[in-house]
Amino acid sequence: MTFPGLGERVAEAKSRVAEAVTRGGHNQQVTIVAVTKTHGPEAAAEAWAAGITDVGENRVQEALAKIAQVAEPVRWHLIGHLQRNKVNALGSFTLFHALDSARLAAAVDVFGTSRGAPVAVLIQVNPLREVTKGGYDENEVGAEAVRLAKMSGIRVTGVMTIARLGADEAELRETFSAARKAREVFSDAGHPATGLSMGMSGDYEIAVEEGATLVRLGSLLFGAREQ
Ligand SMILES: *Cc1c(COP(=O)(O)O)cnc(C)c1O
């Protein structure tokens, strides 16, 4: 075991998620995406043994190398930014969480169309317009939802956001509820947008209270990262 106590931490996170669903009243199903970045393939294998079915990576090269070494049938999520010249890598993932620009959308659409199956994506939104972060502004999502609905190579299954590091509770709730409203814009435009990827180790309980269906947990499960 490289990660002693992982089973207990997974169980604890699951029960805290369940309590947060009750408090929030959104009545949603929540999937924990275990974020294994910087750790070896054994992190994904041990997470699977501990009852995790979904694993997330933020860098494509690291992810592809790891995927090749993990025999367990986990679902792989790409949670970080993707360069347009690497869209073919999306064939290795169940869900891409970070569709963050019109130019990237065009490239993903070409890939999905050429392989004959749309790519499942979440639209990354940046409600507070942090300059260090990608994602759409709230005032862009309406037009983008209409535009993306015409692309047969993309299937928008929801929205993703990353709260500002160090945000207080009020700001977290503002960010997460803005993402929830952005999801509604996509579903109103006809997308099958039921997913809401938000919440990390430090803020996942508030994210779940605000309606998250996917929480991305790294350090809480595997300990602090060196990189
Ligand atoms: C690393 C990462 C996470 C996990 O962060 P923790 O704070 O370690 O839980 C979640 N989402 C994204 C996009 C990440 O890059």
Image: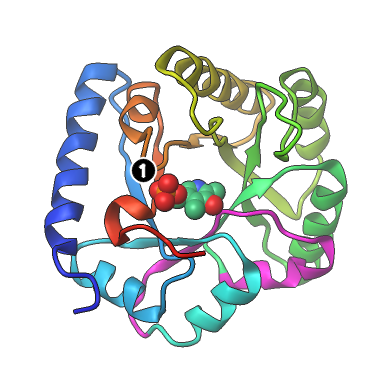
Q: Residue at x 40, y 17 (%)?
A: 169
Identify whether 123 is placed above or below 4.
Answer: above
Q: Is residue 82 magenta?
A: yes
Q: Quadrant of the N terminus?
A: bottom left
Mark 1 Cβ inside 8 Å of ligand 1: yes
Three-letter code, disc 1: Ser
Q: Nearer the viewer, residue 69 or 213?
A: 69
Q: Looking at this view, name the residue that lies furthest to the front.
A: 226
Query: In the image, 168: left or right of 132?
Result: left
Q: Nearer the viewer, residue 219 or 27?
A: 219
Q: Is residue 65 magenta?
A: no
Q: Count residues near mark 1 (Cα–Cα under 10 Å), then give few for <14, some for 14-19, many for 20+.
A: some
- Residue 30 position in % (x across, y down): 32, 40
Answer with the quarter of the image where residue 149 lies. top right
Answer with the quarter of the image where residue 191 lies. top right
Q: Which residues are magenta?
A: 71-92
Q: Residue at x 75, y 25 (%)?
A: 137
Q: Residue at x 39, y 21 (%)?
A: 210
- Residue 177 position in % (x across, y down): 50, 18
Residue with the mark numbered 1: 201
Q: Nearer the viewer, residue 38 or 204?
A: 38
